[in-house]
Image: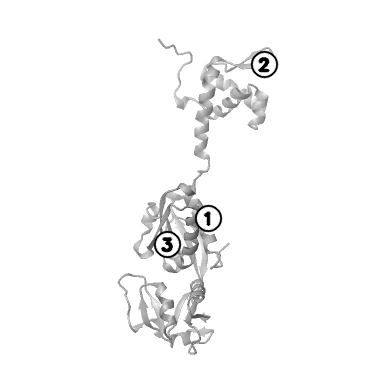
Amino acid sequence: MTTMVNTPKNLRAIDLNLLPVLRSLLKTKNVTRTAELLHMSQSAVSEALKRIRLQFNDDVLVRVGRNMVLTHFAHTIEEKLDSALKEIETLTQAEEIDLLSLHREIIIATADCVIVALGKKLIEELRIKAPNVHVQIINVPETHVLELERGEIDFIIVPEPIVEGNTLYKEPLYKEEFICIARRGNQKVSSPLSKDEFSKLANIGYRPEANSAIRVNRPFKDGWVEQLLVPHFTLLPFLVEQSDSIALVQRHVGEIYSRHFEIDIIECDMGIAPMQVSVFWSEAHQNDAFHRWLRGKFKDFLADDINFIP
């Protein structure tokens, strides 16, 4: 037959704030020392001990001569209490991740003009530090903010006006400025290029929709004419390099292209205001340790090619 020495209590009847004090008292067996360790006054610890004794119906600490010793009940709960509080404390501590052994898939919705700058560093960083993390890039037109809010997409990286959502988190990455690219040594193009001069030149543009394909001589606003309209941004340098046509692109993209193609950067004044590009994520991933690590890396990935927002 089992005999209960102490009256059992419902957890809601126990002041959980007293448990850290109790754990310290069981270890130190000293009110003054516990007060020092917990940065409390001695009177506050003495009052807490009184409440502990009432809640557990046990003296917990008793004086024997000049020393305080644990009661039998205190001995029986000391190890259990310490273990339970350590488990609870892990809930409030930052999650530790082992990047090398982490297996995970990340989905990023963005445009290829962002991946031009982001991709190389992203590949290098993951290959070295998180080789089992796989990243899938999807087009922004195929996504919806609801998918991001539900956590089905990890990140959306786009100019801020494109994404609206009061529940989303965001971090500014960089501001997009626009320039023109032209075949290296193209005598028909001068720098800087005015809006009027631009409108008189054949140019190549792009539209990301899958059904846009290539459209010939499509009238553009203000009298501009796009000689070619292509569905992929990365086609532009190939076409510009082989023709007298020019293309309007983000500055960071043009600078990258100029390092790999026979292309010149042409300064121009098209009246296009810089656009702030940000990374967006949802509440579902806010406290995700790997997400925090990757979010902190985005600006590092862009640093070599873009003057990002500090």
Taking the spot 44% from the left edge, 50% from the top edge, the residue there is 285
Q: Which residue is mark 3?
A: 163
Asked if labels 2 and 3 touch by Cβ distance under 8 angstroms, the answer is: no
Label 2 to label 1: alpha-carbon separation: 53 Å
* Farthest residue, direction bottom: 187
Label 3 to label 1: alpha-carbon separation: 21 Å
- 145 or 259: nearer the viewer: 259
Applied colour scheme: one colour
The amino acid at mark 2 is: Asn
Q: Is residue 12 left or right of residue 41?
A: left
Q: Quadrant of residue 214?
A: bottom left
The amino acid at mark 1 is: Gly
Q: Which residue is mark 2?
A: 67
Where in the figure is residue 169, as x and y percent of width and height?
Answer: 47, 55
Where 174 falls versus 13 (above or below)?
below
Q: Which residue is mark 1?
A: 296
